[in-house]
Image: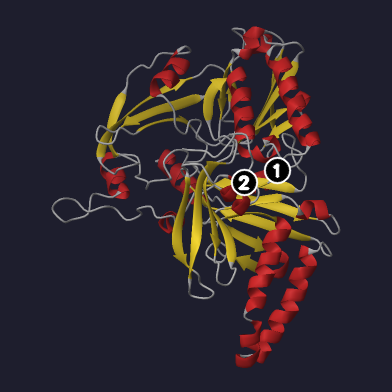
Amino acid sequence: MASSGDEGRVVRDLRSAAESAGGDEALHEIESLCMRCGENGTTRLLLTTIPNFREVVLMAFECPHCNERNNEVQFAGQLQPKGCCYRLEVPQGQNEVLNRQVVKSDSATIKIPELDFEIPPEAQRGTLSTVEGIIMRAVEELQALQDERKKADPQKAEAIDQFLIKLRSLGSGEAAFTFVLDDPAGNSFIENPHAPSSDALLSVSFYERTSEQQAALGFLVDPPTGESGGPLQNASTVEANSGGLPKVPHGSVGAVAGRRAIAQGNPDEIAAALCRYTAPEEVDTLPSTCGACGAACVTRFFATKIPYFREVIVMAASCDLCGYRNSELKPGGEIPAKGKKITLHVQNVKDLSRDVIKSDSAAVKVPELELELSMGTLGGIVTTVEGLIVKICEALERVHGFQLGDSTNEWKKKKWDDFQQRLSKLLSLQEPWTLIIDDALAASFVAPATDLIEDDSQLLIEDYERSWEQNEELGLNDMDTSSADIAYNMTSTE
């Protein structure tokens, strides 16, 4: 994608960015209708990239007749594998929190639970603003039609006036509130000024999109029809008749099922990593449907056991029609009764080459870097210790692009530079460091350096009881298996 000027520039004012790129081939001007006066104005389109974040289209409209102006951001890149939900706690009187930058995509919804207030995706289009800016824009839009409301429905207009007083108090920092940014496309973002360290006021979670969200994003949900006019065989029919994998629409391929250790990857690399422990006894096949195009394909799978870990099922599917490939590593057996915490003391080069399986349910910590990743970040991957740290840092740089641009404060740049220097020292083993993987479902693994895991003094594995909150997040508190247990016991006694 073409870019205007230097690649390291962070775009903050859309109209200024478009004007400054007057000679760039990526700048396009089109005549557009002004929605205020009805005359024709000019819309400028600029294709650019927010450094280490996303490809975007910046749009700036200006009407020479009534001086109406507005800016808009639309994302030109692909959807993320999962949706994201940012939750920012804004304390009373802390204006620096209100000044945090927010990237809101076209599909994002903003909520303020304290006021039972919600800004739907169509109310505010894609924008680059701050927490305060988004709130004050909502105030202006609600205020715009108050004169007409007072004539048509004075009681409703009075209620909105009272609500606007409360909303303005939040925008000025007079009251504490919670700012929730929910984006099914995964392309929205709230700045973390403490990155790469965690922020006590900001939390982020990732989730699988529902079929309704898929449809809202423009993806096919209903099964397509075949050449004969009838619908293709749906996922449940395929699964019932042939044991195939369920079909999912575009955009939701990848890490769909819980406790996946691999979302997408190269089947050859994954097989090579696993077969160093044990070779597959026999590879079985089963008919299935492609998760991308819905065509019939074949899934190959085999069961194997990783020493000191558990039995796993390796599955790989490829589509001859569209070329889509997908690999998965599913833990076998029941959900463990306890979670697992793995602590590795990295001291030499061999430790960096240890194999690591990180599941979707695992959190990662590196105390020496003050680095902490919550459950779900990066999805599930099979890699090495060094590869895991590198992937984490690449993800941080991609997401926290605001701390790396030309207009960033010097102290923020210095913080990132210090982080990179400390990271280089750890990967070059100038000093020992610690890797902690905390998995509530015990589906992660770090390879031992000795034949007996008890002899590996650098590797510590601890089992612990999951808290009620962890079980609730994993959906275990609502899981009732009593009927299945009764049926199983009756079958066993017969």
The amino acid at mark 1 is Ser
The kind of secondary structure element at disc 1 is loop
The kind of secondary structure element at disc 2 is strand
Q: Nearer the viewer, mark 1 or mark 2?
A: 2
Height in image: 287 above or below 449?
A: below
Q: Is tag 1's residue or tag 2's residue first in the polypeptide sequence?
A: 2
Q: How far is the residue under mark 1 from the one under mark 2?
A: 18 Å
Instruction: State the residue position of label 2.
Output: 205
Q: Is residue 28 left or right of residue 202?
A: left
| Residue under the image location 30 percent in, 25 percent down | 284
Whole-percent x, y for residue 185 in the image: 51, 50
Whole-percent x, y for residue 429 in the image: 71, 11
Does the rendering let one see residue 475? no
Viewer-side residue, 248 vs 195 = 195
What residue occupies the far right of the structure in this picture?
93
Residue 210 got which mark?
none
| Residue under the image location 71 percent in, 21 percent down | 423
Residue 467 got which mark?
1
Please identify the quarter of the rendering in which residue 354 is found: top right
The amino acid at mark 2 is Ser
Viewer-side residue, 375 vs 54 = 54
Height in image: 440 above or below 15?
A: above
Viewer-side residue, 32 vs 441 = 32
Whole-percent x, y for residue 141 in the image: 63, 72
Height in image: 369 above or below 218?
A: above
Please identify the quarter of the rendering in which residue 130 is found: bottom right
Q: Is residue 179 left or right of residue 59?
A: right
Q: Residues within 10 Å of mark 1 (few under 14, many from 20)?
A: few
